[in-house]
Image (cartoon, grey):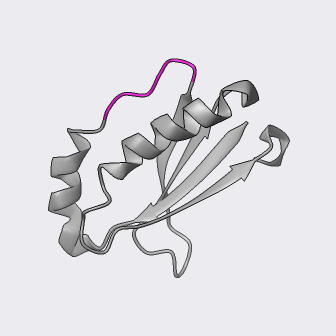
Amino acid sequence: MTIKCTFSIPLKSIRDYARQIAEVPPLPEYITKRGPYIDDAVGASNQTITIYEFDESKYPEAWKNIFKQLGAFHGIPGFSFSAQVMAKDNV
């Protein structure tokens, strides 16, 4: 199973992001993290994409761990986040 997460942070909040990244808890070994990748498409300013892959049987636990990791950025001014659950063959 795959979860594709897209988030953006305004440039004025980059320092806050850099401080928070040090506090991000590590993911369990059963979750493979790919990225972050910068989306340089027109109109996608400051968007970062991270892909998380794991066995479907671990979905509830994996989602909890991914959300905990990304939750560290929730208080950053201008932070926005979206997630898309995908079948592995749709990535």
Q: Where is residue 36 shown, x and y percent of the image?
A: 46, 47
Q: Is residue 23 above or below residue 91?
A: above
Q: Where is residue 5 shown, x and y percent of the image?
A: 55, 54
Q: Main secondary structure of the magenta part?
A: loop
- Whether the magenta-drawn stretch holds residue 23 is answered as no
Q: Residue at x 75, y 48 (%)?
A: 86
Q: Where is residue 13 shown, x and y percent of the image?
A: 21, 68
In this picture, residue 81 sits left or right of residue 24 = right
Q: Where is residue 85 shown, x and y percent of the image?
A: 70, 50
Q: Residue at x 31, y 75 (%)?
A: 78
Q: Over which residues does the magenta segment extend?
A: 25-30
- Farthest-out residue, bottom: 43
In this picture, residue 58 sits left or right of residue 43 = right
Q: Nearer the viewer, residue 8 or 37?
A: 8
Picture mark count? 0
Q: Residue at x 57, y 20 (%)?
A: 30
Q: Give the quarter of the image for residue 24.
A: top left
Q: Quadrant of the N terminus?
A: top right
Q: Residue at x 50, y 39 (%)?
A: 64
Q: Is residue 73 above or below residue 60?
A: below
- Farthest-out residue, top: 29
